[in-house]
Amino acid sequence: MRYAFADLLMIATVALVCAGFAPAVQAQDASAWDGEPHGASRLIAGATLNVGDKKLARAGIEIHLDQGWKTYWRYPGDSGVPPKLDFSGSENVKAVSTLWPAPERFADGAGGHSIGYHGDVVLPLQIVPDDASRPSLLHVKLSYAVCGKLCVPADAQLALTLSGRPGTKEPILAAAEARVPRRVALNAPGNLTIASIHRDISSGHARVVVSVGAPEGVAIDLFAEGPTPDWALPLPQPEQSPVASPDGMRRYSFELDGLPTGAQPEGAMLKITAVSPTDAIEVQARLD
């Protein structure tokens, strides 16, 4: 079959458009990787979330780390630097909420423990647009630490237009959102529960005791945060073996150290996060 030159030109044009179509769709789902030694980061996009009569755009900061390297949670523990996120420069963005998947504790090499993530992690973002009928351009200045035996500071400039449509990165983002601790009330029913938080001064030194309920044999870990970022509370430690006490509760405690100058523990609002292999919860409670 013979083709005229105009026909061949049209066929070639269609072929180029088709060849370029898949990368264009991919670009809407994720920004380019911004790499540093032993780590890299990018933005990924998800489908719009309907909450009542409001619409929230969804995105995530995906951080890839080399094997054996780690980065930190919003509260890094005994040592470390939490990620810093700056969303200035975004367009059609009224507010951004950062969600934090359940972390783990690891030895910091100096006799203490830090809190964070190994391998890959996605920090989900929920974005309130100024105008929900238009796409939002999300711009993030990200600073974080990538740590092996030594820590390397990392910085990234990430940008992505959020169309609000489901894309290929939706499963990655949804999996990260599923690992964000659920906010529950103190002593809320469930397989994982924080039953009580109280201050104990019987030993002559103030400490906080936390009672946690979980199925027998299930490993759990606990993290404590103060009402402001300048509180540096110790990591809770189990007071007994993994076998529950007669009331079915496991006891964890930490001393009331690391308070900022002039801060009073009485009435302070603490945030306790409990993590198991399959669940994670977060409780806020006023310290008596």
Image (spheres, rainbow, N blue to C red):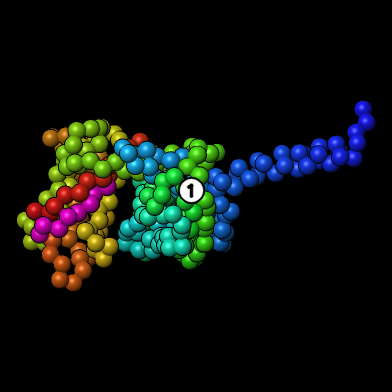
Residue hosting label 1? 135
Count of marks overlaid on the render: 1
Front-most of residues 30 and 231: 30
Instruction: Give the residues in magenta.
Output: 266-273
Residue at 56 percent across and 58 percent down: it is: 34
**Secondary structure predominantly adopted by residues drawn in magenta:** strand
Is 47 situated left or right of 77 in this image? Answer: right
Crowding around mark 1 (Cα neighbors within 10 Å: few <14, some 14 to 19, many 20+) is some
Is 55 situated left or right of 158 in this image? Answer: left
Point out the residue furthest to the top here: 1
Residue at 19 percent across and 33 percent down: it is: 189
The N terminus lies in which quarter of the figure? Answer: top right
Q: Position of residue 193 (x, y in %)?
A: 22, 38
Q: Is residue 171 above or below residue 146?
A: above
Residue at 40 percent across and 57 percent down: it is: 72
Point out the residue furthest to the bottom here: 261
Q: Position of residue 159 (x, y in %)?
A: 52, 56
Q: Position of residue 170 (x, y in %)?
A: 49, 39
Front-most of residues 137 and 145: 137
Q: Is 86 inside the magenta-drawn segment?
A: no
Q: Is residue 163 above or below residue 152?
A: above
Report helix, strand or loop for mark 1: loop
Residue at 36 percent across and 54 percent down: it is: 95
Is residue 182 visible in the rendered image? The answer is yes
Task: Please state which amino acid type lies under the numbered disc 1.
Answer: Pro
